[in-house]
Image: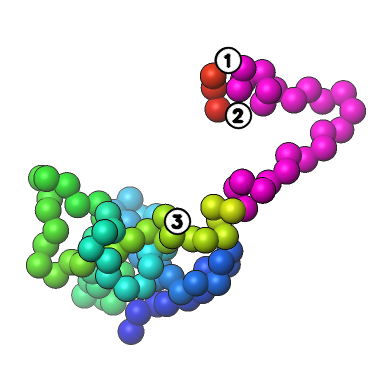
């Protein structure tokens, strides 16, 4: 049985996997040919995921899935709407300076 839960941001169903690096990655629960992540269930029932490459193409037991970060509706709109916090007196905002120099804040 898949570990399908709800996204805390948008409420959509997500399937949690474990990457090759041991990190958790949320993917959409249905296979998607447009996805860029393969996932499979190992012998212990843990969902594993990885990025396919020319050296390690998709194996017969793997399916392509779309990472949930690419399809999360609310996360994209939340980034655009975020308002920077008001800084306390005496604290300089370096983000404007970094943007002027072409660096990310």
**Mark 3 or 1, nearer chain start:** 3
- Mark 2 highlights which residue? 105
Q: CA distance from mark 2 to mark 3?
A: 21 Å
Extreme-bottom residue of the structure: 1
- Horizontal arrangement in the rendering, residue 70 relative to residue 60 (left or right): right
* Mark positioned earlier in the residue sequence (2 or 3): 3
> Would you say 39 lies left or right of 82 here?
left
In the picture, which quadrant includes the N terminus? bottom left
Q: CA distance from mark 2 to mark 1?
A: 10 Å
- The reply to whether dot 2 and dot 3 touch (C-beta < 8 Å) is no
Classify residue 90 as left or right of residue 81. Answer: right
What is the number of the mark on residue 101? 1
Q: Can you identify the residue that label 3 sits on?
A: 69
Instruction: Give the SS element for disc 1.
Output: loop
Whether the magenta-drawn stretch holds residue 80 is answered as: yes
Q: Secondary structure at mark 3?
A: helix
Question: As rendered, which of 91 and 18 lies closer to the eye?
Answer: 91
| Residue range highlighted in magenta | 78-101
State the residue at coordinates (28%, 77%). Answer: 45
Q: Which residue is rendered at x = 33% and y = 50% of the image? A: 21
Answer yes or no: is residue 18 visible.
no
In this rendering, is residue 48 above or below 98? below
Q: Residues within 10 Å of mark 1 (few under 14, many from 20)?
A: few
Cα separation, mark 3 vs mark 1, equals 29 Å
State yes or no: residue 74 in magenta. Answer: no
Please state the horizontal and vertical placement of residue 32, each as a whole percent of the image. 27, 66
User: For the point 57% across and 60% down, which residue is it?
Assistant: 74
């Amino acid at each position: 049985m898949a570990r399908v839960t709800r996204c805390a941001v948008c409420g959509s169903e997500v399937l949690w996997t474990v990457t090759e690096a041991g990190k958790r990655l949320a993917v959409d629960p249905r296979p998607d040919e447009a996805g860029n992540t393969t996932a499979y269930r190992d012998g212990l029932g843990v969902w594993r995921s990885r990025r396919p490459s020319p050296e390690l193409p998709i194996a017969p037991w793997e399916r392509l899935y779309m990472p949930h970060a690419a399809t999360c509706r609310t996360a994209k709109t939340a980034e655009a709407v975020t308002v920077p916090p008001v800084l306390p007196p005496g604290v300089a905002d370096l983000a404007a300076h970094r943007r002027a120099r072409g660096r990310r804040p």
